[in-house]
Amino acid sequence: MITTILVTLLILSIGVAVFFYISLKKALERIDVLESELDTIEKLNTELGQWVVDFRKLVSNVYKKLKSVDERGIFEKDDDVGFLFQEMVTIVEECNKRITDNDDNLSNEEQNKK
């Protein structure tokens, strides 16, 4: 009777141990996959961050150049060139505004973290 109980407990213990081993092995494999995905995401995030910095510089430079070109009001708003120029100025102004707003928001967030 006691032998039967001990054998049953032994079999049960082995079963539980095998279950935990398989579960742990699958969890570790999943962690490896997630680490690989995280590395890829971090690389993409770095590339995107650099693209945003470069885009900010580009928009800022274009904005300054457009403002200096039309400083004297050379382009008439009623002709095709003037219309196109005004649309380009509007697009660049909107981009510049959003970039500036994002810079302000990031600065506020950084100050709030401190």
Image (spheres, rainbow, N blue to C red):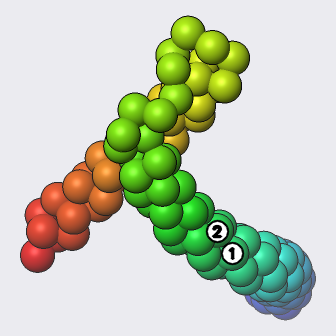
71 on left or right of 1: left
Q: Amino acid at mark 2?
A: Trp
Query: Residue 23: in sight, yes or no?
Result: no
Q: Which residue is mark 2?
A: 51
Residue in the picture at 47% in, 34% down: 74
Does 47 sit above or below residue 82?
Answer: below
Residue in the picture at 51% in, 16% down: 77
Secondary structure at numbered mark 2: helix
Secondary structure at numbered mark 1: helix
Instruction: List x then y, in percent, for residue 14.
Output: 85, 86
Distance CA(mark 2)–CA(mark 1): 6 Å
Q: Amino acid at mark 1?
A: Glu
109 on left or right of 68: left
Q: Which mark is residue 47?
A: 1
Q: Residue furthest top?
A: 78
Location of the N terminus (image quadrant)? bottom right
Residue in the picture at 71% in, 80% down: 43
Instruction: List x then y, in percent, for residue 45.
Output: 63, 71
Would you call the spot at circle 1 few (<14 residues within 10 Å), some (14-19), or many (20 or more)? few
Instruction: List x then y, in percent, for residue 49.
Output: 57, 71
Disc 2 + disc 1, Cβ < 8 Å? yes
60 on left or right of 58: left
Query: Residue 7: in sight, yes or no?
Result: yes
Does 14 sit above or below residue 99?
Answer: below
The one of 35 and 75 positioned closer to us in this rendering: 75
Instruction: List x then y, in percent, for residue 55.
Output: 58, 62
Residue in the picture at 47% in, 48% down: 69
Does 58 sit above or below residue 78?
Answer: below
Location of the C terminus (image quadrant)? bottom left
